[in-house]
Image: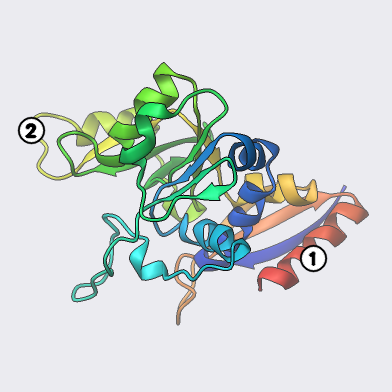
């Protein structure tokens, strides 16, 4: 077993995760034969952009945000809607609220999160709405009707606490602030992306950065010579 080291900024991590999500057979099948919903959010923006560019359509990431943690004074543009693709057709201006009641087995919802516990591969999302926002729309389709939920999330959002414990703290009746909801979906971080795309085992070994590289992550990739060469080629493409 050989290994190489790489460093990814959060933006490069999003590009990597995007490639891994879009190459999945279940995502492709949902877009082609069922319904694929990409819920607005910063991690999902590159996924949305790739899907629209395939169709020759423009995309503005500043109009694909909901509840983002951002610098004071910077506000997103008017929400363009989520990305809803039904049997290959993009439905402009639609959101998950428009189609949630119709979603079920075979459909895929892609929704980002705000916290990930890497050992358990579990994620959660901040909640500011008394009716749970887009998560509230997605949960009946996922839990009740077996639509698939994918949670693309970068390792910069990792937390030490188990997700259930973080949720207990933030949802306590005496807590003042947003709530936190565990997401019953499959987590896709940079580590899962490396495995999917290159066949390597990726381990997070260090983190940090300055001058625009804040939140960067250092990974050690382990695999055979061919898989590591695929990794090098991929890193050049997303660099």
The residue depicted at 74 percent of the width and 72 percent of the height is 236
| Distance from the alpha carbon under mark 1 to that under mark 2 | 49 Å
| Relative to 189, residue 212 above or below | below
On the rendered image, what quadrant is the C terminus found in?
bottom right
x then y, percent, for residue 180: 27, 37
Q: Is residue 161 visible?
A: no
Q: Is residue 33 visible?
A: yes
Residue depicted at 9% across the width and 42% down the height: 176
The answer to whether residue 186 is above or below residue 72 is: above
Residue underneath mark 2: 174
Mark 1 or 2, nearer chain start = 2
**For residue 232, which numbered disc appears in the image?**
1
At mark 1, the secondary structure is helix
Q: Outermost residue, top direction?
A: 144
Q: Residue at x 80, y 67 (%)?
A: 233
Position of 181 compared to 111: left or right?
Answer: left
Q: How many marks?
A: 2
């Amino acid at each position: 077993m050989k290994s190489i080291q790489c460093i990814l900024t959060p933006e490069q991590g999003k590009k990597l995760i995007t490639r891994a999500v879009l190459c999945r057979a279940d995502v492709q099948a949902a877009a082609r034969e069922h319904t694929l919903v990409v819920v607005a959010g910063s991690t999902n923006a590159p996924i949305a952009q790739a899907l629209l560019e395939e169709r020759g359509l423009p995309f503005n990431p500043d109009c694909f945000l909901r509840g983002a943690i951002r610098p004071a004074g910077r506000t997103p543009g008017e929400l363009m809607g989520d990305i809803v693709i039904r049997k290959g057709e993009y439905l402009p201006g639609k959101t998950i609220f428009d189609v949630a009641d119709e979603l079920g087995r075979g459909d895929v919802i892609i929704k980002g999160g705000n916290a990930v516990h890497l050992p358990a591969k579990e994620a959660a999302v901040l909640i500011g709405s008394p009716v749970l926002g887009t998560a509230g729309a997605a949960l009946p389709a996922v839990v009740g009707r077996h639509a698939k939920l994918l949670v693309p999330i970068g390792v910069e959002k990792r937390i030490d606490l188990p997700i259930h414990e973080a949720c207990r703290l933030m949802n306590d009746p005496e807590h003042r602030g947003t709530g936190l909801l565990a997401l019953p979906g499959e987590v896709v971080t940079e580590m899962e992306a490396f495995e999917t795309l290159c066949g390597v085992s990726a381990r997070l070994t260090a983190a940090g950065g300055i001058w625009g590289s804040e939140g960067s992550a250092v990974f050690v990739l382990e695999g055979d010579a061919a898989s590591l060469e695929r990794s090098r080629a991929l890193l050049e493409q997303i660099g």
